Image (cartoon, grey):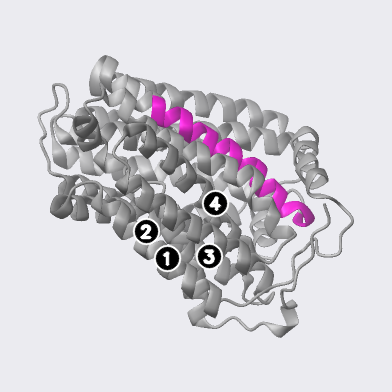
Amino acid sequence: MTVTSGESSHAEVRLSRFVVFLFAVTAGSSAGCLYYLQPLLHEISVDFSISTATAGLVVALTQIGYLLGLAFVVPLGDFVNRRRLVTGLLVVSCVALLAAGLLPSYGGLLTMMFAVGVSASAAQVVVPWAAAIAGPHERGAVVGHVMSGLLIGILFSRVLSGLVAEIGGWRAILFVAAAVQLTMALAVWFRAPGARPAAAGSRQSYSQVLASILTLVWQQPVLRHRMILGGLNMAAFSGLWTAITFLLAGAGDSPYDYPEASIGLFGLAGVAGALGAPIVGKLADRGYLRHTQYMAWVVQVVGWALLWVGARDVMILIVALLVFDFGVQGVQLANQTGVYSLDDRARSRLTTAYMVAYFAGGVIGSSVGAWAYQAGGWSLVCGLGIGSAATGFAAWALFARTERAHPIQGVAAHARLRT
């Protein structure tokens, strides 16, 4: 398959603050679609008369769709007009969200949320798009702003879903999200600049590019290590935020009984990730990349222990969420810094490989989190979480020993990330 593009060259594009803001909002609104229903799983289980484990499939299927989008849609950004690709994905997202809100069956909801997940991969098309058209002197700042928008979108989605569901029921958030995606599709189509695809004019076919991703995984042990750690990290994160919705809603023997709006507000505790990332980044800059991995996994163990205690004390629960999310974001940043240090020319493919493993872990975590809460309550969820963090620490201790001869240094890796 030969793909051509009519996008403008880098030299013809000047990134304004509005365009950076547009990219950031697009990434945030798309990523947020993965999590709108997560705080509302208890209401969905009651509405369809299904178990908590079955309700958890809503999040799992959405993430499976996103996983497939990362694997098969995101690489297209190197070949085709990204403005058309992102606009198309946003339109698909809008239609799927509308259908998910209108269809009366649980099967229909699952099918449409799977489509929402695939189209949410627009978030990961926007990030390299921004990097491609930004000047060398501003690339790091631009990508940082877009990634911040993505993170804020994830956090705000949970808050917004709770507030909207409190007023109009859990289906109402799907209609609001559809309106947002339609607005973003129009904004991207009419206001976003173009950029010449990195592989424009290449004789390499789409299937060959996909095959080269597997080659990178085979040839790069550091990438394989980070894929394992990333999957484990995301499994814990997704499992927690899936299970905690049932705890806060009063399912099982939980002492809590919060309405949807209040449950959504707990998502603000994720701001710890935004606060923790610069700290971890500074440590990596100073050459402590390996040390940050150890620290982050230990922080996760502490976070899970506090989460277990927080089953009966909401203030401890909030502190525990802050601590846990700090650990999760620490692992994520350390992983990405290591991955991006491997090969500047293959950054998009490295990203695809890592993020596929990352969200594969999220799919597993969502399913296990819902099952664990139903089978053994909050104690089982936290027990599995402590086990996952301890496994991550042990795995990193093994990987760090085998990587001693690899030329990954915190300063060099972080510098490459910003070039």
> Which residue shows up at 81% across the image and 64% down it?
200
- Report how far apart the C-alphas of labels 4 and 2 lie in the structure: 16 Å
Neighbourhood count class around disc 1 (C-alpha, 10 Å): few under 14, some 14–19, many 20 upward: some
Magenta segment, which residues?
Answer: 344-367
User: What secondary structure is found at the residue carrying circle 1?
Assistant: helix
Foreground mark, 4 or 1?
1
Say whether residue 37 is left or right of residue 284.
Answer: left
Mark 4 or mark 1: whose residue is earlier in sequence:
4
Q: Quadrant of the C terminus?
A: bottom right
Check residue 178 in the rendering and tell me which mark sits there, or answer none. Answer: 2
Outermost residue on the right side: it is 203
Residue underneath mark 1: 182
> Which residue shows up at 57% across the image and 55% down it?
124
Please indicate, yes or no, whether residue 310 appears anywhere in the rendered image.
no
User: What secondary structure is found at the residue carrying circle 4?
Assistant: loop
Residue 120 picture location, percent across and down: 49, 52
Mark 2 or mark 3: whose residue is earlier in sequence:
3
Say whether residue 168 is left or right of residue 408.
Answer: left
Task: Say above or below: 133 vs 158.
Answer: below
* Amino acid at circle 2: Ala
Residue underneath mark 3: 144
Mark 1 or mark 3: whose residue is earlier in sequence:
3
* Amino acid at circle 3: Gly
Q: Nearer the viewer, residue 188 or 350?
A: 188
User: What secondary structure is found at the residue carrying circle 3?
Assistant: helix
**Is there CB contact under 8 Å for labels 2 and 3?**
no
Mark 4 or mark 3: whose residue is earlier in sequence:
4
Residue 411 picture location, percent across and down: 65, 57
**Is there CB contact under 8 Å for labels 2 and 1?**
yes
- Report how far apart the C-alphas of labels 4 and 1 lie in the structure: 16 Å
- Report how far apart the C-alphas of labels 2 and 3 lie in the structure: 26 Å
